[in-house]
Image (spheres, rainbow, N blue to C red):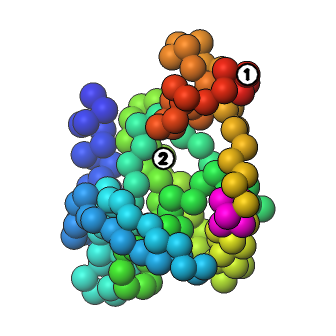
Amino acid sequence: ADLRRFLAEDGAFRQSTGAVPLLFEEPMAAVGPGGQEFRGYIDRIDEDPASGERWVIDYKTGAATDLEDGDPLDGGRKLQLPVYLLGAGRAPSRAVYWFISERGGFRMVVYPSSPANDARFAATLAAIGRGVASGAFPAVPGEFNEFYGEFENCRFCDFTRICARGRG
């Protein structure tokens, strides 16, 4: 049912934007404003052949979340879309989280790229860089998830098995 609904939503998206899928699982390498190096894969890049506008799409299967109006980077916890914009190549581009399940309501959440948000992104990366250089790696485990028997943020961390037990 999710797949059928997604295909319908995808058709509607392409019809409304004029964009067509261009690249899938696109390898990405980018250099941040402070010289940081990023590597990864962008789920999908669509392009409108008439305008050249690109859509950088990151699929999400969980429950939909919003990007905060005052801080779409969520205090440095949501850096994926601005990093993908760096690696997507040419502008103009828009970056979106696309929640592709009933659980996420098939919503698209657009990252509001702007000079102010670019400056906030650069400042956030600089602060993270200063923390790494000083050896500060504070644990931010999030809420305990009873289903997984693990803290929410720790489920995705490569170092969870060696982290301090008292981190929560």
Specify the quadrant that holds the C terminus: top right
Identity of the residue drawn at 60% across and 54% down = 78
Callout count: 2
Against 145, residue 162 (above or below) is below
| Residue wearing tag 2 | 107
Three-letter amino acid code at disc 2? Arg
Three-letter amino acid code at disc 1? Gly
Quick check: 89 left or right of 8?
right
Q: What is the magenta segment's predominant secondary structure?
A: helix
Quick check: 153 left or right of 104?
right
Measured as percent of width and height from the top left, residue 2 is found at 31, 32
* Residue 17: quadrant of the picture: bottom left
Measured as percent of width and height from the top left, residue 132 is found at 66, 59
Q: Which residues are magenta?
A: 129-133
Specify the quadrant that holds the N terminus: top left
**Which SS class for mark 1?**
helix
Identity of the residue drawn at 54% across and 79% down = 35
Q: Rate crowding at label 2 as few (under 14), some (14 to 19) or many (20 or more) other CA atoms within 10 Å.
A: many
Q: Rate crowding at label 1 as few (under 14), some (14 to 19) or many (20 or more) other CA atoms within 10 Å.
A: few
Quick check: 13 left or right of 82?
left
- Magenta region includes residue 89: no
Which numbered tag is attached to residue 105? none
| Residue wearing tag 1 | 166
Mark before the other along the chain sequence, 2 or 1: 2
Q: Circles 2 and 1: CB distance less than 8 Å? A: no
